[in-house]
Image: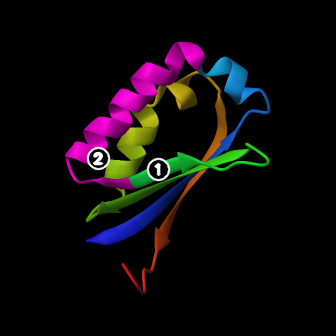
Amino acid sequence: MNYYLLIYYVAEDYLERRAPYREEHLRLVREAHARGELVMAGALADPADKAVLVFRSADKAVIEDFVRNDPYVKNGIVERWEIRRWTVVVP
């Protein structure tokens, strides 16, 4: 199993725009967590310009599928994203 960081670069006004999509986004987050794929997730603060989601999976496709289905991505609240394999030293 590998660890991956999913880094979301969000729109400047994402805090205002996310409301209609928040429940669906959180549902996807909770489902991924319940399956054991998503370890933890949260938004960065001061400034609120990014979010980081930590996945544990054998295949990067799991994260790509999450991104494809995320309403924040589909509706332009996430302007760009990247997936990085993370070499964890201390779990």
Callout 1 amino acid = Ala
Q: Counting other residues with Cα less than 10 Å from the Cα at mark 1, is it few (<14), some (14-19), or many (20 or more)?
A: some
Provide the major secondary structure of the magenta segment.
helix
Which residue is rendered at x = 43% and y = 64% of the image? 4
| Camera-side residue of 57 and 36 | 36
* Residue 22 included in the magenta stretch of the image: yes
> Could you tell me if the residues under marks 1 and 2 are in contact, i.e. CB atoms within 8 Å?
yes
Residue corresponding to mark 1: 41
Residue closest to the far top: 20
**Side (left or right) of 16 relative to 84:** right
Q: Is residue 2 above or below residue 77?
A: below
- The quadrant of the rendering that contains the C terminus is bottom left
Callout 2 amino acid = His
Q: Is residue 79 above or below residue 53?
A: above
Is tag 1's residue or tag 2's residue first in the polypeptide sequence? 2
Residue corresponding to mark 2: 33
Q: Secondary structure at mark 2?
A: helix
Q: Which residues are magenta?
A: 19-39
**Side (left or right) of 15 relative to 18:** right
